[in-house]
Image: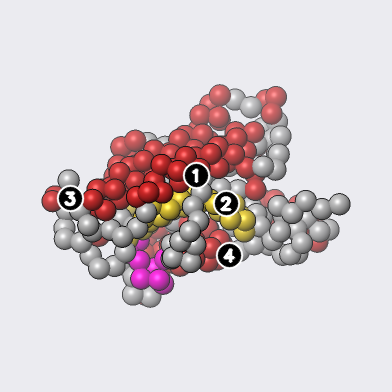
Amino acid sequence: MLLTYQRMSNAPAAIVTGASRGIGRAIALELGSRGYSVIVNYHSNAQAASEVVAALSEIGARAWPVAADVGSADDRQRLVDAAMQQCGRLDVLVNNAGITSPGRKDLLDATEEGWDRVLDTNLKGPFFLSQLAARQMLELRQAGELERGTLINISSISAYAVSTNRADYCIAKAGMEMMTWLYADRLATDQIHVYEICPGVISSDMTAPVREKYDQQIADGLTPIRRWGEPEDVAKAVGTLVTDTFAFSTGQRFHVDGGFHIRRL
């Protein structure tokens, strides 16, 4: 219950999953620059998370590293509890944490073990973490302590672009669109907005092993904007969505992909 937590802070608060590196790190820094207190979630790299917290502190933002596997129910609860215990509120959840398909196996060689691991982290975890966050936001709104809430799902162009060696990843990301619609519909009357962001080819440690491949494809016109995306490109989209700029929009997919989604002849 709210009474067990510290009094509401004036600063809005956000949970960013997978915030120790790449896109998640950039999102955490963007929200911190906008005055948010940030729960910096990480899975195993405590040092990297601490570095993000230090960077946030340097720009005057309050932040706390919280170890949690979003595929674990207990860990998901820990994230929401951390936001309430440290900040006394929860305004924004960014479901960013994700893993690629283990071994990038061909569709006919994919394993149930790999499927379970990817779906737990990339779809089940975000779904049930959103459930916990939404319940907390509703409680805060009923208490008159929250004007609006925002849930943002970081998806991928793999939600609609087939990679036969990453079936589990593609299916998890495709499921995120329906998840976004479901939560957007359920929560709209409670002033909780839900969005999906689909990044394209983003420069990060996850894409580093295929750098040469995408360098060539981008040069050959894979995307109308012929450059790699940067984590900050995604972060800026998140920064806009937590404002009232799109106050009459919910359930919307925003492409941050250099135009990849455009069908061309």
User: In the image, is residue 37 part of the stretch drawn in magenta?
Assistant: yes
Other-residue count near label 1 (Cα within 10 Å), few / some / many at <14 / 14–19 / ≥20: many
**CB atoms at circles 2 and 3 under 8 Å apart?**
no
Left or right, 106 with respect to 147, comes to right
Q: Residue at x 69, y 61 (%)?
A: 258
* Residue behind mark 2: 253
Q: Amino acid at mark 3?
A: Leu
Colouring: secondary structure
**Residue 227 occupies which quadrant of the picture?**
bottom right
- Give SS at disc 4: helix
- Give SS at disc 1: helix
* Residue behind mark 1: 180
Could you tell me how far apart the alpha carbons at marks 3 and 1 are, in whole angstroms? 27 Å
**CB atoms at circles 2 and 1 under 8 Å apart?**
yes
Magenta span: 31-38
Q: Residue at x 70, y 24 (%)?
A: 108
* Residue behind mark 3: 2
Q: Residue at x 52, y 58 (%)?
A: 23
Point out residue 93 in the picture as x, y percentages from the top left corner: 39, 52
Point out residue 129 in the picture as x, y percentages from the top left corner: 38, 42
Give 115 or 160, whichever is nearer the viewer. 160
- 2 vs 4, front mark: 2
Q: Amino acid at mark 2?
A: Arg
**CB atoms at circles 3 and 1 under 8 Å apart?**
no
User: In the image, is residue 83 part of the stretch drawn in magenta?
Assistant: no
Mark found first going from the N terminus, 4 or 1: 1
**CB atoms at circles 4 and 3 under 8 Å apart?**
no
